[in-house]
Every structure is written in C-alpha cells, then in structure tokens.
Image (cartoon, grey):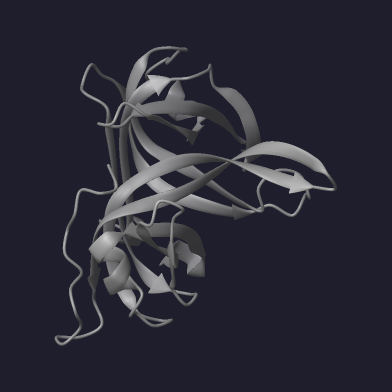
Amino acid sequence: MDENGLNNTVELCGILGAAPAVSHTSRDEAYYIFPLEVGRLSGAVDQVNVIAKASLLETVEVSEKEKIWVKGELRSFNNKSGQGNRLVLTVFAREIELTDKEDTNEVLLRGALCKQPNLRHTPMGREICDLMLAVSRRYGRSDYLPCIAWGQNARGAADLQVGSQILLKGRLQSRKYIKVSGGTSQEKIAFEVSAGTIAPLDGPDAPVVLETSEYV
C-alpha cells in the first residue's frame, strides 16, 4: 500500500448530483468533477465534490442520479483566485463502481496538527473543537484538512499540541453558512471532517480520545 493509502482514505456511496463536468487537464489527461450526495443517519445530506480522471470514468460510464461507490483520498487546494472558499476540499477518486449499497461516508486520516486546537461552544451549548490536520502526500506534498470534534472528543482534542501525530476516523460533511461582506450576504458551503474517533500517536502515555457517534 502506498503512503497515500496509509495516511488518507475516503470511501463514499451516494447519488451523483449532476453529470461530470471538465475540471482541468494535467499531463494530457482530462479530469472531471461532480457532486456526490451522501445521506446521513439523521436524514441530512452532504454534498461532496469528487474529481476523477476521464479514463476512470470511462470504465463505468456514470450519469446523473445514478448511485456510485467511490474510494480515494481527501485533497486540499489553496484557492488564490479571490472567488469562492479559500481552502477547497475535494475527494480524488482512485476507484469508482456502480452500486446499490446503502449510503457510506468514511474517512481515515493520519497526520500532524498544524494549528493549535480551538475549543468553543455552539449557540446550543455543545462543545466543539476545531482542528487543522496536515496529511502527507507523495513527493513531499501535504494536504491541510479542517476537522471538528464534539463532546468528549472535543475536550480531549483541545489538550493536543501543534505537531501532535493523530489517527482520525470520521466522515466528510458539508455545511452551509452565510458570509456578510460589504453589507451583502452570500450563502457559502464549508467542508470539514467530523471526527468519530481520535487517537494520539505520539507516545505510550498520550491520552486516547474515546469513540462517540456524535458526528453522525
């Protein structure tokens, strides 16, 4: 298994929200992007953006509203265009199949904290901790992935230090919010990994944050 597979794995089952559209071309290979709609147990739906090579899509010939299974890795891109989100998250597909399985959304990440965790409370009083995880990719590159933890996970994660190595399991979720700029309101979508399990990997005495189901 390559380094990406050890550090960064995403598995999704969901409905194709729109037909694949050309994203970009690299080394004479066309890449396509499409939204995948993945349901939660709560009934909410996360819309995740997936990028795949044209050659991979040709093997399954997917079309809008079909249900597919995707396995790949979570990628980040620093958007400097001034339009849209500054940090763009997509799932880079390595495998795609048509499926009739139940919706699935599983993320496994191994990486290092690159910002101090931020413990806060929601308006409803729930504890939440913001994390930024740097996950190594091949050729010396890294993906910077925003993550959140809830409840007991949040309290444990808040004690971690910058540079701490952790193993995180959770789900990739989308969240709508309103940004006000210059007196104008605009709806935006943020993406983050909601943690179900976090385990420090820095030493035998590191506290293990217990698994919860609060991210579902």
What residue is drawn where x is 55% and y is 30%? 33
**Residue 80, percent from left and from top:** 74, 54
Camera-side residue of 182 and 58? 182
Examine the rendered structure and indicate whether residue 176 appears above or below residue 57: below
Tell me if 181 is positioned left or right of 147 in this view: right
What residue is drawn where x is 74% and y is 39%? 185
**Residue 25, percent from left and from top:** 65, 37
Tell me if 118 is positioned left or right of 208 in this view: right
Q: Quadrant of the N terminus?
A: bottom left
What residue is drawn where x is 83% and y is 44%? 183
- Spot the residue most to the right: 182
Tell me if 21 is positioned left or right of 200 in this view: right
Tell me if 172 is positioned left or right of 50 in this view: left
Examine the rendered structure and indicate whether residue 172 appears above or below residue 125: above
Q: Quadrant of residue 65?
A: top left
**Residue 200, percent from left and from top:** 25, 75
Disc tally is 0
What residue is drawn where x is 52% and y is 18%? 18
Q: Quadrant of residue 159?
A: bottom left
Q: Quadrant of the C terminus?
A: top left
